Image (cartoon, grey):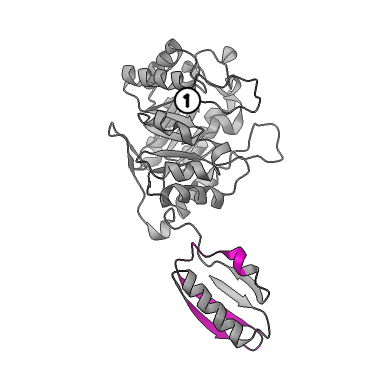
């Protein structure tokens, strides 16, 4: 971190300021006195240094970091890719492609179990499904909640597919004890109290990018989880809000290689929420695989026109089968290049 002090800042102020910084933070401060300004260089882990507090000093001209504020998620400090192993031995981040497929919402036992069988037959390696559903309208279907979780577990029992489902509240963590991957949705990406609690458990967390969040904000949210001790984080690009209204969101495909460069964590892409249109899912999925994604999370419903949520962006099992085969072929071709 570099701090530039204003012209004519007294030596007494500089000395007192340096001593305060070193006393309150585990850093060493080097000072360079120029003709017009004094520059302070902070050496060490500046994660806990409060930039706003420093800027509030009337003798400080500017402050800037020379390294990213996220440390545990940063590839600079962890050059090797993180590989997350699930309870059934499935590895995410090892170079293979994983497809998490299933309905937006769990609606019934017959529905979720049949879809699970269909997507597994087509090559899906994980089952996604919503039990607790955050909806824009308070009158929309909110999910089957705890019952939905039990139905997801039944589908896992029948197919062997690990399950991925979304959590919304800290008080629900105990309900997710037997879930393979806990998903944090876009609306909760900056629910820091939830992230802190998820950092205390030993379970993979699928962290979705917020609707209007920057890549650094996504990585800082991952840092919250990892700072608590849980380093099993999977990043998810699911589209961001832009001026374009044709699609539900705009898929930031560049986020995949950027996240791969900045972080060692696995990256998956959600083409369903990014587009909001089922006919776009195949193209966006292919682009994500070509960009280097470790996986995809795709919505599949046996009867999209009568789905209780997000039917317009859901593939039928037949459509998913065709898409999955193309994705597998593309991944194989890219691996052999």
Find disc 1 in the rendering and name its residue.
Answer: 323
Q: Is residue 105 left or right of residue 85?
A: right
Q: Name above or below for residue 222 compared with residue 151.
A: below
Instruction: Examine the structure image and report whether residue 48 is included in the region drawn in magenta.
Output: yes
Instruction: Examine the structure image and report whether residue 4 is included in the region drawn in magenta.
Output: no
Q: Is residue 320 left or right of residue 141?
A: left
Q: Name above or below for residue 182 compared with residue 18.
A: above
The residue lying at 48 percent from left, 19 percent from top is: 106
Q: Is residue 80 left or right of residue 219?
A: left
The residue lying at 53 percent from left, 35 percent from top is: 185
Q: Is residue 321 visible?
A: no
Provide the residue span drawn in magenta.
29-54
Query: Mark 1, residues whose alpha carbon is within 10 Å: few (<14), some, or many (≥20)?
Result: some
Q: Residue furthest bottom?
A: 35
Q: What x and y, as percent, mark residue 57?
A: 65, 72
Quadrant assignment, res 95: top left
The residue lying at 39 percent from left, 60 percent from top is: 77
């Amino acid at each position: 971190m570099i701090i530039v002090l204003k012209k004519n800042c007294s030596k007494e102020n500089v000395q007192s300021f340096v001593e305060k910084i070193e006393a309150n933070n585990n850093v060493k401060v080097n000072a360079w006195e120029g003709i017009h300004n004094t520059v302070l260089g902070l050496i060490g882990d500046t994660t806990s240094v409060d930039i706003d507090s420093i800027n509030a000093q009337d003798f400080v001209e500017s402050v800037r970091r020379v390294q990213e504020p996220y440390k545990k998620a940063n590839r600079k400090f962890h050059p090797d890719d993180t590989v997350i192993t699930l309870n059934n031995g499935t590895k995410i981040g090892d170079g293979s492609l994983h497809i998490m497929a299933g309905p937006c919402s769990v609606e019934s036992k017959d529905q979720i179990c049949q879809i699970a069988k269909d997507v597994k037959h087509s090559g899906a390696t994980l089952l996604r499904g919503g039990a607790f559903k955050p909806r824009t309208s308070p009158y929309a279907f909110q999910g089957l909640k705890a019952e939905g979780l039990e139905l997801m577990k039944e589908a896992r029992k029948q197919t062997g597919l690990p399950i991925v489902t979304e959590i919304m509240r800290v008080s629900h963590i105990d309900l997710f004890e037997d879930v393979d991957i806990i998903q944090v949705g876009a609306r909760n990406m900056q629910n820091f109290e939830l992230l802190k609690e998820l950092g205390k458990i030993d379970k993979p967390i699928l962290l979705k990018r917020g609707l209007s969040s920057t890549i650094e904000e996504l990585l800082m949210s991952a840092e919250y989880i990892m700072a608590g001790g849980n380093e099993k984080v999977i990043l998810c690009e699911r589209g961001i809000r832009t001026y374009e209204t044709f699609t539900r969101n705009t898929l930031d495909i560049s986020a995949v290689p950027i996240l791969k460069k900045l972080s060692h964590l696995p990256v998956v892409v959600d083409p369903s929420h990014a587009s909001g249109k089922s006919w776009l899912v195949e193209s966006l999925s292919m682009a994500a695989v070509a960009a280097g994604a470790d996986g995809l999370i795709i919505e599949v419903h046996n009867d999209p026109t009568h789905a209780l949520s997000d039917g317009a962006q859901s593939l039928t099992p037949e459509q998913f089968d065709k898409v999955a085969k193309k994705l597998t072929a593309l991944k194989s071709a890219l691996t052999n290049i």
